[in-house]
Amino acid sequence: MKLRRYDLNLLPVLETLLRRRSVTRAGEEVGLSQSATSHALMRLREQFGDELLRFSGRRVQLTPRAEALAAPLRGALERLEQLLESEQFDPATSNRSFTILTADYMGALVLPKLLKRLDKEAPGITFQVTWGRGKVSEALHSNQIDLALTPHEHAMDPDIRSEPVFWDDMVVVAAADNDEIGESLDFATFQRLPHVVFRHDIESPAPSFADLQAIRHGVEYRQTMTVPNFQLLPLIAAESRCVALTHRSLAERMLKMVNIRIFVPPFPTEKVEVCSLWSKTVDLDPGHRWLRQVVKEVCAGLNGSPSLA
């Protein structure tokens, strides 16, 4: 076995060295003296046949080999830890940390209710929430995130597991005092008015779910402003002539805070299907299964909003 070439006890030290880029700080984290950590680095260099860390004054750089090792090594150690501790998971006593990727409007709906569950069931568990850029599947495979709550379009990778957890309708929001709109919003007015639209990444402006709904029905409108945050859509619409095609759950939440009206779109739109996504490598991990079930139950309580007349 090739594994016999390596001292596996040194792998946690290597992962910490690559992450901290400091012999002193890595030693403090793993509980070794500076000299013992330096000796471990020397042995790791021999085993891998690579310098791994390059020191130049106060600057430390990873070699290309080390860069390639960093994320997979971290993921492998996390999965090994999950495997060895899988039978010991108890949410009431666990101090595990999970990272969730989701959009700001879904976070506003889900996270407060999730925290209520944690207070009762898992007071030691912590969460980090991100709305990062890049491919969701890559972030899941590299263990940068544990769970994603995103539209179903992201669930295309065969190594990514998915489960629908929330459904939402599309609506149009406009300022309550916008006198260019009557009791209902007709198609001509929708196209004529300026629009504020969501755009996640200015460098790669892929169409949003709302954009795709308009494109599929040949709807054209003037995009006066693009924003990277869903919750800005009703806020801007409330203070301008702009309208925004957005999610019902967000619109109804903001209706209590800003002066807007909610309209049925003047063309057919599909429901938004939000899925819970995770890597198959954590499929059987008891802690992850608990996380998915709690998120599923919280999201289930969000479904079933009454339809607009």
Image: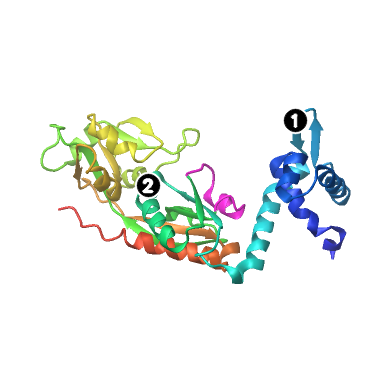
Q: Which residues are magenta?
A: 131-145
Tell me if 296 is positioned left or right of 233 in this view: right
Q: Nearer the viewer, mark 1 or mark 2?
A: 1
Residue drawn at the location 56% of the way across and 67% of the way down? 89
Residue drawn at the location 78% of the way across and 49% of the way down? 32
CA gap, disc 1 to disc 2?
44 Å
Residue drawn at the location 38% of the way across and 34% of the way down? 227
Residue drawn at the location 38% of the way across and 57% of the way down? 116
Chief secondary structure of the magenta portion = loop
From the viewer's side, name the closer residue of 106 and 31: 31
From the viewer's side, name the closer residue of 198 and 306: 306
The reply to whether residue 221 is in sight is: no
Residue 11: horizontal and vertical position, in percent? 76, 54
Residue type beneath disc 1: Arg
Residue 135: horizontal and vertical position, in percent? 54, 47
Residue type beneath disc 2: Phe
Callout 1 secondary element: strand
From the viewer's side, name the closer residue of 290 and 94: 94
The reply to whether residue 255 is in sight is: yes
In the rendered image, the residue lying farthest to the right is 46
Callout 2 secondary element: helix
Numbered mark located on residue 59 in the image: 1
